[in-house]
Image: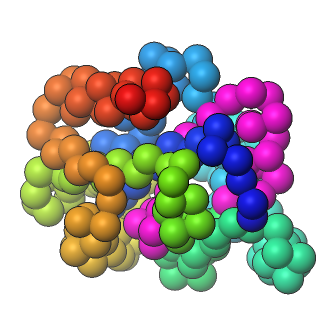
């Protein structure tokens, strides 16, 4: 997709449970010029989630239709049989509103976006302090079955091996320190310095 240099993209990526949602929320509060990029997903909606706010939930058929129409800038089967993707129309919607999309996406998707927008994106990888801590956080969230928790741990191990591909890495040992570190990086990115 051709893009002008002012169409910036902020990418936050991490293994699931690394604290990326807390950092994403913090950045959205701090910077009114950022707007959360709502992904399409085929997984079940959780009870605390809202359609069109957390995700555009869609059936597998609809998602595949959109793949055929090339409606996605990237999409991945993030977990067994569950598809997630960034809609081109979502980025356009945010840019049109004069804002900068903040993408909270998995590592493979983040690499794809970076390749497409090498000069206008900032990618930040949030590193969990250890796999045992990650296990504790995911279990504490109470949203996982033993199988899905194990799948997320396996995926996290794999995803950590890609961290050097990103512009910056933040170790999330202490959430408020990690938030402040992210804030500094984003401030710099937004001001173009
Ligand atoms: P969850 O099911 O916990 O909401 O998200 C699972 C994973 O999918 C998270 O790592 C999240 O960042 C990732 N994800 C969410 N939206 C997208 C997307 O549009 N594309 C990709 N590649 N990953 C996404």
Q: Is residue 163 left or right of residue 49?
A: left
- Image spot of residue 137 (x, y percent): 24, 48
| Vertical side of 30 occupied by 72: above or below | below
Read off the magenta span.
86-111
Observer-nearest residue: 137 or 160? 160
Residue 60 visible in the displayed image? yes
In the rendered image, which quarter is residue 174 located in? top left
Residue 93, magenta (yes or no): yes
Residue 101 visible in the displayed image? no
Residue at 41% over, 66% down? 107
Observer-nearest residue: 127 or 73? 73
Q: Is residue 28 left or right of residue 73?
A: left
| Vertical side of 105 occupied by 36: above or below | above
- Image spot of residue 150 (x, y percent): 29, 74
Residue at 60% over, 49% down? 46
In the rendered image, which quarter is residue 36 located in? top right
- Image spot of residue 185 (x, y percent): 32, 33
Rendered-image quadrant of the C terminus: top left
Q: Is residue 98 left or right of residue 147?
A: right
Display coloring: rainbow
Observer-nearest residue: 158 or 72? 72
- Image spot of residue 154 (x, y percent): 27, 77
Residue at 50% over, 43% down? 10
| Vertical side of 114 occupied by 89: above or below | above
């Amino acid at each position: 997709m051709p893009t002008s240099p002012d169409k910036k993209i902020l990418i936050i990526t991490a293994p699931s449970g690394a604290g990326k949602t807390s950092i994403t929320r913090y950045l959205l509060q701090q910077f009114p010029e950022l707007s959360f990029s709502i992904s399409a997903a085929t997984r079940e909606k959780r009870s605390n989630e809202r359609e069109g706010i957390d995700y555009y939930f869609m059936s597998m058929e609809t998602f595949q239709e959109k793949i055929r129409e090339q409606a996605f800038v990237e999409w991945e089967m993030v977990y067994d049989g569950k598809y997630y993707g960034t809609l081109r129309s979502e980025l356009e919607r945010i840019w049109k509103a004069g804002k900068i999309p903040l993408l909270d996406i998995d590592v493979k998707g983040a690499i794809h976006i970076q390749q497409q927008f090498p000069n206008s994106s900032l990618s930040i990888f949030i590193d969990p302090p250890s796999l045992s801590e990650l296990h504790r956080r995911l279990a504490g969230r109470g949203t996982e079955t033993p199988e899905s928790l194990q799948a997320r741990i396996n995926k996290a191990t794999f995803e950590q091996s890609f961290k050097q591909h990103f512009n910056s890495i933040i170790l999330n040992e202490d959430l408020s320190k990690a938030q402040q570190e992210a804030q500094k990086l984003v401030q710099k990115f937004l001001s173009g310095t």
